[in-house]
Image (cartoon, rainbow, N blue to C red):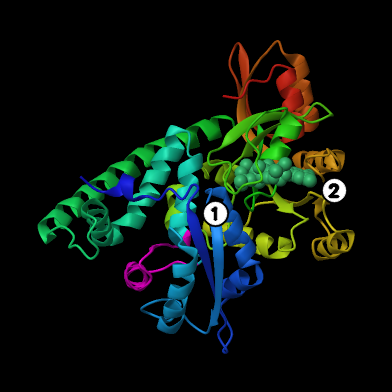
């Protein structure tokens, strides 16, 4: 048996000390480093911890040029933390950084407290919110990939719990080997199953390709689901917590001029999203990949709005969606500080200011989408019964006819036309095959 399930944390109502190490290289940091630096890391870590229900009893910060290879925070700071731990008696130490299995092991032996890194914390949040089969499978894959290099550590951790003896030895190498093989097999099976889901998803999405598809993307908690609910009258979960949505929901959005758009809401992004999470969630992100247009929802009331925008752009690049047409939506303008909003608008002049909650700015957003739809064209082959002269006349007027052939009862026509005209043509009886 792989000790996976039990060893994944439940931090709910547990006492936690938060640790944030800022890496401030005197020689300059990488772009990713700078991005992490500017976002209010502690605020975000607190929010992540709040989302899993932890009770924060202390905070520790450290600035250092590079992580310590053995302890990440450095041995001196780890010793110093022991005093705080004696006083606050936390159940967990939560790091805002990703730690190697060895660093976790070393820290736990000095601090005598369970240490959780950023990826494990995010996995715990995903664990709370994974409801559909697909989200659960994706999560299990990400958990296994995270746990595999840490199996030995998890085992000794479990045997400690079971035996109550600190430092008890883990399983023999043979047992570990069996577990590794089991984990590998499960990973292979999960990947196959998810690939099947992704292919099915791809087919489903492309079977709707005669519709103009729009996907909501954005930093977690920016207001994607709220916007989706507001404009499509859906009632899905929106919460002031991170990663409320873990799957994709698609619904019809009928614009006020009668145009119909398929709108998808999906999982939120975060800076330094663990890469195995991103690759596990490929099936969920299929909608984003195939969308005709992305709406990038930004929480304009957040002091970190600009950094969040660049974190989302990095993820879009990673999933090869950075060359898609995108409208930046500056949401929560009802909350935003007016000066900060002005600065943001200067930085993103094409940004569309709205409040999803108060329903303001939505008409302008619709106009922008309608405009893009009228410009965007697609090619398709259609069969038109000879007696449908109105449709044929409409296509001659509005579409580019690329080729045409006929038999006794119908015309077979290859046309290029705008999405907006496609909808009207459908009303006249055009059937897309
Ligand atoms: N004041 C205000 N609050 C908003 C607005 N839009 C969303 N919110 C709030 O922001 C919080 C997060 O909204 P969600 O819609 O769940 O955000 P999300 O982007 O779907 O988040 P994840 O699914 O976690 O990625 C909720 O408490 C919403 O009520 C807005 O325009 N104004
Ligand atoms: Mg959501």
Q: Quadrant of residue 62?
A: bottom right
| Residue hosting label 2 | 334
Q: Relative to residue 46, is residue 200 depicted above or below? A: above
Q: Quadrant of residue 373?
A: top right
Q: Quadrant of the C terminus?
A: top right
Q: Position of residue 23 (x, y in %)?
A: 54, 78
Q: Nearer the viewer, mark 2 or mark 1?
A: 1
| Residue hosting label 1 | 55
Residue 224 visible within the image: no
| Quarter, ligand 2 | top right
Within 8 Å: ligand 1 and the Cβ of disc 1?
no
Q: Considering depth in this image, is 96 or 11 the residue closer to the camera?
A: 11
Q: Relative to residue 391, is residue 277 depicted above or below? A: below
Q: Quadrant of the N terminus?
A: top left
Give the mark, 2 or 1, whose residue is nearer the N terminus. Answer: 1
Find out whether residue 98 is within the magenta segment: yes
Which residue corresponds to the image point at 23% horizontal and 51% vertical from the top-left? 162
Count residues near mark 1 (Cα–Cα under 10 Å), then give few for <14, some for 14-19, many for 20+: some
């Amino acid at each position: 048996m792989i000790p996976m399930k039990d060893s994944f944390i439940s931090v709910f109502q547990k006492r936690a000390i938060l640790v944030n190490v800022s890496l401030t290289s005197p020689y300059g940091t990488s772009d990713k480093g700078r991005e992490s630096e500017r976002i209010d890391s502690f605020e975000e870590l607190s929010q992540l911890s709040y989302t899993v229900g932890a009770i924060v009893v202390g905070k520790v910060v450290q600035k250092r040029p590079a992580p310590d290879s053995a302890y990440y925070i450095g041995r001196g700071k780890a010793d110093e933390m022991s005093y705080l731990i004696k006083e606050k008696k936390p159940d967990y130490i939560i790091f805002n950084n990703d730690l190697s299995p060895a660093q976790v092991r070393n820290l736990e032996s000095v601090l005598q407290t369970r240490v959780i890194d950023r990826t494990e914390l995010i996995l715990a949040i995903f664990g709370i919110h994974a409801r559909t089969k697909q989200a659960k499978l994706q999560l299990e894959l990400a958990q296994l990939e995270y746990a595999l290099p840490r199996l030995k550590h998890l085992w000794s951790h479990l045997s400690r719990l079971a035996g109550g003896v600190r430092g008890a030895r883990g399983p023999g190498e043979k047992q570990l080997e069996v577990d590794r093989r089991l984990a590998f097999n499960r990973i292979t099976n999960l990947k196959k199953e998810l690939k099947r889901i992704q292919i099915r998803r791809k087919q489903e999405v492309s079977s709707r390709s005669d519709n103009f598809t729009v996907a909501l993307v954005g930093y977690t908690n920016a207001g994607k689901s709220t916007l989706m609910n507001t404009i499509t009258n859906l009632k899905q979960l929106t919460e002031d917590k991170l990663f409320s949505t873990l799957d994709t929901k698609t619904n019809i959005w009928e614009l006020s001029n009668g145009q119909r758009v398929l709108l998808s809401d999906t999982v939120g992004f975060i800076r330094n999203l663990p890469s195995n999470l991103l690759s596990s969630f490929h099936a969920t992100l299929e909608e984003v990949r195939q969308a005709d247009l992305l709406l990038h929802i930004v929480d304009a009331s957040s002091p970190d709005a600009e950094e969040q925008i660049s974190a989302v752009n990095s993820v879009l690049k990673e999933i090869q969606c950075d060359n898609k047409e995108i409208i930046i939506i500056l949401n929560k303008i009802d909350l935003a500080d007016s000066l900060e909003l002005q600065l943001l608008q200067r930085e993103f002049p094409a940004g569309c200011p709205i409040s999803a909650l108060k329903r303001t700015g939505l008409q302008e957003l619709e106009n922008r989408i309608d405009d893009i739809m009228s410009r965007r064209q697609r090619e398709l082959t259609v069969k038109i019964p000879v007696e449908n002269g109105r449709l044929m006349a409409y296509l001659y007027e509005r579409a580019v006819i690329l080729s045409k052939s006929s038999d006794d009862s119908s015309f077979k026509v290859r046309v290029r036309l705008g999405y907006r005209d496609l909808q009207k043509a459908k009303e006249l009886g055009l059937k897309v095959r």
